[in-house]
């Protein structure tokens, strides 16, 4: 089986966009891939985090992943900082990547904005560490959204330059696994903005620890419009909030948008929101309940991550040690 590497930042409780865009897909990949799932807490430091909050977020993220169906017995689940190979290969890749490549990264431009001089160097060299995360395990597949393809491209460029510079064929090419119909989940308050863990308003998102009552209330208050739902997807043009709610329903029900509109077209948002809330509660309440149960035993979660880090190190250590030998480190 090909090895898949997936990383997620432990910055707040995962929300519905994370679940539909990444986590649910990861669960499905476990059937026919060798999976390495990483809580990238080193990447999380590109923006200052309170230390104890970062520790709590690591555990909350781990609990959500396990509750969603990630199996830490059959696959590897750990936090990035517990495996030194990430930092060691990350430094080598910092010395391989070119400044021009990093200057072209759109994510840095978007996050830094006009005040880029005040942002951390870690945010700038983020792609080199991300490349190291993947190549540390000789992973050949990485599930990403369309907006992350550029990071995979630079990871391949870094590996190709390393191989060329040192006259080897050591790091393999990475294939981006992009789900054919990945849902783009937007804010419940503004259908033109992505749903985000960092949004100041908790009403803008469905979190994987929300209770059934929380979910029902957030969907009831979600922004919509005064028109009835159309009978086909073309009728959603220019209706960002309506499109978002229909897209969420379609993704959760594993149906097409047109299938959903075939059922609800012509109805107002009252009945539709009730049906959407019921569907979300049915699918997410078990995840939330299990997440809360797991978080009651912090020591058990810490043990799962320690065991995962040990298994991750067993895979990564020979690969990174050989990379260090290739560049000329003296051991």
Image: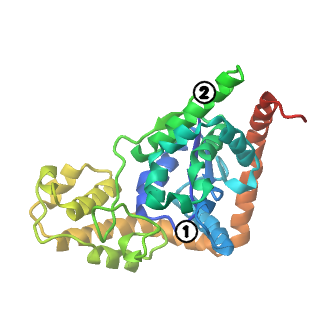
**Above/below status of 232 relative to 249:** above
Q: Name the residue under label 1.
A: 290
Report how many numbered discs are placed on residues in the image.
2
Which residue is rendered at x = 79% and y = 34% of the image?
324
Which residue is rendered at x = 76% and y = 37% of the image?
320
Residue 137: x percent and y percent?
67, 38
Q: Judge left or right: residue 4 versus residue 216.
A: right
Which residue is rendered at x = 56% and y = 73% of the image?
292
Residue 71: x percent and y percent?
61, 52
Judged from the image, the secondary structure of the residue bearing numbered disc 1 is: helix
Q: Judge left or right: residue 277 versus residue 231.
A: right
Front disc: 2 or 1: 2
Residue 228: x percent and y percent?
10, 66
Q: Kindly give the residue lying farthest to the top in the view shown.
A: 167
Task: Give the alpha-carbon distance from disc 2 to disc 1, as whole Å.
Answer: 43 Å
Looking at the image, which is closer to me, 113 or 304?
A: 113
Toward which corner of the image does residue 243 lie, by quadrant?
A: bottom left
Q: Mark 2 points at which residue?
A: 160
Q: Judge the density around disc 1: few (<14), some (14-19), many (≥20) Cα neighbours within 10 Å.
A: some
Q: In which quarter of the image is the C terminus?
A: top right
The reply to whether residue 8 is visible in this rendering is yes
């Amino acid at each position: 089986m090909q090895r898949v590497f997936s990383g997620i930042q432990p910055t707040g409780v995962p929300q519905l966009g994370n679940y539909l865009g990444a986590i649910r897909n990861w669960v499905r990949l476990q059937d026919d891939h060798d999976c390495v799932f990483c809580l990238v807490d080193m990447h999380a430091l590109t923006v200052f985090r309170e230390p104890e909050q970062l520790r709590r977020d690591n555990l909350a993220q781990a609990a959500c992943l396990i509750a969603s169906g990630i199996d830490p017995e059959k696959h590897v689940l750990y936090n990035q900082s517990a495996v030194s190979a990430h930092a060691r290969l990350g430094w080598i890749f910092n010395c391989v990547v070119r400044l021009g490549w990093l200057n072209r990264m759109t994510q840095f431009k978007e996050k830094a904005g006009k005040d880029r001089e005040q942002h951390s160097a870690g945010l700038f060299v983020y792609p080199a560490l991300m490349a190291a995360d993947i190549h540390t395990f000789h992973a050949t597949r990485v599930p990403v959204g369309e907006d992350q393809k550029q990071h995979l491209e630079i990871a391949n460029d870094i590996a190709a330059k390393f191989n060329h510079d040192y006259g080897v064929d050591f790091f393999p090419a990475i294939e981006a696994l992009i789900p054919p119909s990945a849902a783009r989940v937007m804010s419940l308050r503004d259908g033109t903005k992505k749903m985000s863990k960092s949004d100041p308003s908790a009403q803008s998102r469905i979190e994987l620890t929300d209770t059934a009552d929380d979910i029902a209330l957030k969907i009831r208050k979600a922004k919509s419009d005064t028109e009835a739902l159309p009978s086909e997807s073309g009728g959603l043009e220019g209706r960002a909030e309506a499109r978002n709610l229909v897209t969420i329903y379609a993704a959760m029900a594993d149906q097409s948008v047109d299938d959903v509109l075939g059922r609800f077209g012509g109805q107002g948002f009252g009945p539709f929101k009730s049906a959407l809330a019921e569907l979300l509660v049915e699918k997410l309440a078990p995840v939330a309940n299990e997440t809360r149960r797991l978080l009651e035993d912090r020591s058990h979660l810490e043990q799962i991550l320690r065991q995962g880090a040990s298994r991750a190190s067993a895979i990564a250590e020979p690969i990174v040690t050989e990379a260090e030998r290739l560049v000329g480190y003296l051991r």
